[in-house]
Image (cartoon, rainbow, N blue to C red):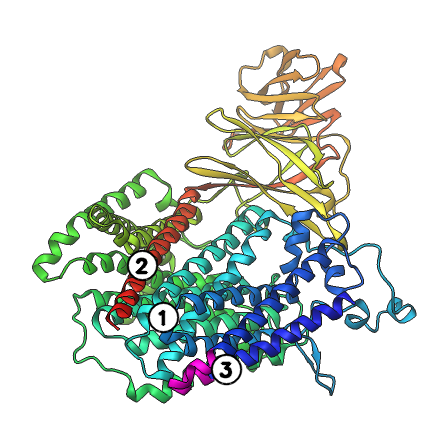
Amino acid sequence: MIGMVGELLLLIALVAGGVSGAAFFQSARSGRGAPRWMPIARGGWYVMGAAVLAASGLLMWMLLTHQYEYAYVYKNTSNAQPLKYLISAFWGGQEGSLLLWGLAATGMGSAVLWLAPKRWRPSVMTVVAVHQTVLLTMVVGVQLGGGFELGASPFDTLAEAMPEAPIVQQNPGFVPADGTGLNDLLQNPWMAIHPPIMFTGFAAMLVPFAFALAALWKRRYTEWVKPALPWTLFAAMMLGTGIAMGGYWAYVTLNFGGYWAWDPVENASLVPWLVGIAALHTMLVQKKSGRAHKASLLLTILAYTLVVYSTYLTRSNVLSNASVHAFVSLGMDTQLLAWVVGTLGVGVGMLVWRWGDLPTPSSEARFLSREFMMFSGALLLAAIAAVVTVGTSSPILGQLFRNSPSGVPVEFYNRWTLPLALGVVFLAGLGQLFWWNKMTIEHLNRVLLKPIAGAVAATVAVLIFTPFARQTVERAPAGGGSGGEAAAQQTAGVVGIEGTFEALSTFWATYGQGLLLILLVFAAFFALFGNGLVMWRIGRGNPRMAGGALGHVGFALLMLGVVASSAFSDPIAPRGLTEEGKERTAFVAAKGRAQQVDGYTVTYEGKTKNERGRGVYELRFEAPGGDTFTLRPVAYQGSGKQWFMHPDLKHYFSKDIYASVTPREATGQQSSEKNGGEITLGKGQRRTLGTDRFDVTFEGFAADVPPARTPDSAKIAVAARLKVANRRTGETRRLQPIYLVMQDRSERFGQVTIDDWGLKITFTGMNVDSGKARLAIEGVQVMPDDWLVVQAKEKPFIGVLWAGILVLSMGLGLAMYRRTKALAFSEDRRGTEA
């Protein structure tokens, strides 16, 4: 009965949305007859909104009261699920997230209906209402005959959703006692706020699209930008904030050690934001100079089209093998594809239809002009979006050439976006400087002197005082010599242009990315100082005018944070290479055993459980400076026998210490417990043996072994100076087992026994170059049964990244506020003059 009410509400919303769209259309095209249609249009919209709101409330009530006879409730909740995750289950599945989008679009359309200039409301709301109607077809779940269902309803019962399930066939009215629960990765506090922000951004991106189509429809090619700008800024702010929240969610929840992995679903939300920011800049160019009409319309249309395209990518079956974040297909692939094609077709079709009618500037912008700089930056942003779109769409494009296409590697995105991002960041510094100064060659030097000088000084400081150069430019590719040597060899062996080209190619392959990163650091500092000067200058007079400069300061900080957190990220792990020749990024920690790892002393102190019964593993860190702290990463086996690992972080002003663990049970390895074993220690290193029983510290080698302990046939005699502490009694003893190399080159090992402790230590070998001693232990466990693999990292200056995102959002918000006030003032004047 409840489900039938919900489905009826969605059907009412669909019909009312269609009526509203038709009435808005009639009002927009009828001119003086508009007043007859507007009450019908408004009434239809409010009926639709009330029905969507009621259906959403009903679904939330079903989730909170565990109505497991409904498939959506059964799949996304369980009896043990906390209240906050019962609430977030609303958008945890595909049907609910689409309904959330519809709810956000309802609010956005209502805001347009109240706040947009009156002369724009009928035409803009026509587009918004049609979109809402199409979106509602995705959740209405109506059978149209021939086996085709329009959308997928969140109110389907188990019998409707899984008719072939044996339990349903035996008992159609079966109601489970418990649900399967929300996906474990989604049971995170950020899940409660990230999707609503993201879908608000999606819904807001519709409004500039609607203004652009209305402008083409009504031939208001120069008027649409001013009322559309506040909505564009709001959409960019909300969508960017949502993307940033998703990145932070990944950083604190997933165990890959970062905030961005170029996953196709992540990219699907990034691309509309990039194009939306590009459209924002061309709109500003159009408003200021009367240029870029075509670019503004095209980019605005593409920004929302890419929102719809991202929906197709994440909710169809095309990325099921390429992304862990993709939804399971609900059989709406054709419907979603039709939505993409329809949106693109209508938008681009209207643009082509009006192309010859669009204004053309009488002259092109000068090279040293604000318009040229902003337009160039917009084109570079669009180029980055194109690269990311191609990479994200590779599973689709690959189907043209192979049966099982896969996604492109991360290197594809890094290689192609880095040089483009360099240009964007540099122009972000020039744009504001040019915006507030009329540039000439003479004026250029004076304006650029301070930001360039500051950027040079800051970049040199980075190269001198940080490991940036060592970790980027100086690092040669694995398996080869340095790029400079290879280039010299090739230049010597091959004469002429071809040889020079090959040498330069080799040099660039070795050092190119590092050099681009250095240039990116310089450009980011230039943008930071340049926009900081502009913000200081104009902020003293009228702070509301500083939104653009503030946003660019945030963008510069964002880019500095990206470079710092990636180039300076350093694994806390034993130095050296693995058996596969790769750099070590993890280490094994046994319970109760203190070990020194890359300057830190790390002790796995044991396992506890949190309030949800999940494993919490306590790692005690002693930093090189003496500071101590405990990290508590979580690892547990969820439903379906899948292991989930959530990291923990220690935040400092200049860095984060990040740790994630993989318990022994998750590795698939059985216990290696045995009484004794072998360890290797460097000078000054300490190792805890057994379950918190003994500490063994290697203090160095001793070559002055007493003759009484050395046979005459010995050629070399070396003792290992050891300090052994009994952690239970506090007693400490010093031992010196010896290692002998005989005249015949055979080896003999000296053993020291502590009878009352039941401990034997034998000096079995040494490495003079590394200064390490190899010791055999008897009488105590070397590797206890309770051990885990630790992945730990230092993430320097990652706080700069989050600060940049915050400042960027504040800049967009301030600019939106100013544009809204300016629009309201102009509308008030228009009304007064009328």
Q: Which residue is mark 1?
A: 117
Between the residue at mark 1 and the residue at mark 3, the CA separation in whole angstroms equals 18 Å
Can you say which quadrant of the picture contains the N terminus?
Answer: bottom right
Q: Which residue is mark 3?
A: 23
Query: Upstream in the sequence, badge 1 or badge 2?
Result: 1
Of circles 3 and 2, which is in front? Answer: 3
Q: Which residue is mark 2?
A: 821
Q: Is residue 364 left or right of residue 150?
A: left
Can residue 476 be seen? yes
Query: Upstream in the sequence, badge 1 or badge 3?
Result: 3
Q: Is residue 117 magenta?
A: no
SS state under label 1: loop
* Part of the protein shown in magenta: 26-38
Q: Amino acid at mark 1?
A: Pro
Q: Say which of 674 and 244 sits in front.
A: 244
Residue shown at 29% from the left, 89% from the top: 356
Q: Quadrant of residue 207?
A: bottom left
Q: Quadrant of residue 274?
A: bottom left
Q: Say which of 542 and 530 sits in front.
A: 542
Q: Amino acid at mark 2?
A: Lys
Can you say which quadrant of the picture contains the C terminus?
Answer: bottom left
Q: Amino acid at mark 3?
A: Ala
Q: Say which of 624 and 190 sits in front.
A: 190
SS state under label 3: helix
Other-residue count near label 3 (Cα within 10 Å), few / some / many at <14 / 14–19 / ≥20 = many
Residue 443 vertical position relative to residue 280 in the rendered view, above or below = above
- Give the number of the disc on residue 569: none
Between the residue at mark 3 and the residue at mark 2, the CA separation in whole angstroms equals 30 Å
Residue 498 vertical position relative to residue 758 in the rendered view, above or below = below
- Residue 223: x and y in percent read 29, 75
